[in-house]
Image (tube, grey):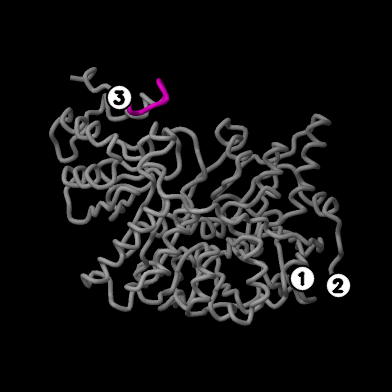
Amino acid sequence: MNFPILTPREAAELVNHNDNVGFSGFTASGSPKVVTEAIAQRAEEEHAAGRPFKINLFTGASTSDHADGALARANAINMRTPYQSTPDLRKRLNEHDAHYFDVHLSDLAQSMRYGTYGDIDVAIVEVADVDDEGNVVLGTGVGNINTYVAQAKRVILELNEKLPAALRGMHDLYMPADPPYRREIPIYKASDRIGDAVMKIDPKKIAGIVRTNLHNGVKAFSALDDTTLRIGHNVCGFLESELRSGRIPSTFLPIQSGVGNVANAVLYGLGESTVIPSFEMYTEVIQDAVLDLMKKGKCTFGSTCALTVSDEAEEDLFNNLDFFRDKVALRPVEISNNPEVVRRLGVISMNTAIEADIFGNVNSTHVTGVRMMNGIGGSGDFTRNAYISIFSCPSITKAGQISNIVPMVSHVDHSEHSVDIIITDQGVADLRGKDPLQRAHEIIDNCAHPAYRELLRDYLKLCRMGQTPHRLECALEFHNEFNRSGDMRNVDWARFK
């Protein structure tokens, strides 16, 4: 191998204050792990010496504690996009110690290529293998790294010995032409492969290689509780009903599923269903449950941007690569989340909400409208273009002190025009073909927790008539009451009569 072998610190010295830095990966999968911690240490030293040191960080989605976490604790991030999920970075964003702009994941690569956010100074890439010509086998997450590498002035490779070179063949790396020269993206079923198995990097750009030997560190999901299981059961019941009615083709359609316990419960439920046939996934993340479904023959193929699986499931994956290689395509996020392809394939989208209001608007990012949780991620890419768009959440949280069905969401990420179905542990609200008032009754009757149904009905009685009947001076009273007393159940509508 002709490229210099660097220590993490030597690699970190190649990154300067105010650089635009692009990371490989999508979630913890494929994200760099040791150079990032060395950059954080360098930032702490520079700050102690009274010198500024912050970078502008571009990724595929969230990363891990090795990256976002370490850099946030060192206050080494000036600007961050497009998605994050670590507590330390979330704290920085909400305190405005770091700038964050939240964008749809499929949008960023094209904007980068047109120079909207400036050039990439350094790209840091986790790889499973590299040859002297600069052909690399990526890890278990892709993200936007093919665009960042194409733009970068220099590239640092983290060669992770935990990753087998035999991952070669799982990746499908394709970069569309930019408007106005773009043609159709030639994916006509989830399993179509249209790109390269390796990423080609100009060898002159490669500044060096840092050797690592680390898992992604993804923890297994906690055991499913009764609420999560009921949500999963309700989602599966809805899809079975749609299939029986003929509103979903008998061959079924590709599935997109978000990340988390609710998504995992839904996937396991689909696996146990005797009504739903074997299916493909066209999604942004594959979790442990999908690998299990592939072994059982229930999921026949998974197109994704990342294999975000626990360390135990990753070991099983690596031990059985011959089985999984032709069942997975790891793609850049602008392809895995591409609206054109999502609509062509008829993807059924399933994502989670923080809260939904009685008219069908969804907040998936902000707690009480002001505190960022993670970001919109890819949910908008899929929701707006899905064959059927589904959002799910528990009906209540914090032992009933919070209703996740509210009169008006405190922040809108997905409007009523994009949301077809809302599902909670209480039931299913089908919003298709209904006007706002009909939707309100559907959601209250089927999705709200019994402790909040009358409060929500009483709100409607207060509302002035109109196409969407709201009473603006009290529309956010659920949130106001929670901020006052810590319990939404204490709302007193008599104040507004």
Q: Residue at x 15, y 40 (%)?
A: 467
Task: Locate residue 113, reporting x and y percent.
Answer: 56, 60
**Vertical comparison of 89 with 338: above or below:** above
> Disc 2 marks which residue?
2
Is there any visible trace of residue 407 in the rendered image?
A: no
- Please name which of the two marks, 1 or 2, marks the residue nearer to the observer: 2
Is there any visible trace of residue 171 in the rendered image?
A: yes
List the single residue furthest toward the top.
495
Q: Who is closer to the viewer here, 297 or 105?
A: 297
- Between the C-alphas of marks 2 and 3, the distance is 69 Å
- Between the C-alphas of marks 1 and 2, the distance is 9 Å
Image quadrant in which the C terminus is located: top left
Residue 487 lies within the magenta run: yes
**Vertical comparison of 7 with 17: above or below:** below
Task: Locate residue 233, reporting x and y percent.
Answer: 36, 58
Element carrying mark 2: loop
Image quadrant in which the N terminus is located: bottom right
Q: Are marks 1 and 2 in contact (CB under 8 Å)?
A: yes
Q: Quadrant of residue 395?
A: top left
Which of the marked residues, 3 or 1, is nearer the chain's N terminus? Answer: 1
Q: Residue at x 27, y 38 (%)?
A: 450
| Magenta residue span | 483-489
Which of the marked residues, 2 or 3, is nearer the chain's N terminus? Answer: 2
- Please name which of the two marks, 3 or 1, marks the residue nearer to the observer: 3
What residue type is disc 3 on?
Val
Q: Residue at x 66, y 41 (%)?
A: 77
Q: Who is closer to the viewer here, 457 or 480?
A: 457
Residue 178 lies within the magenta run: no
Mark number for residue 203?
A: 1
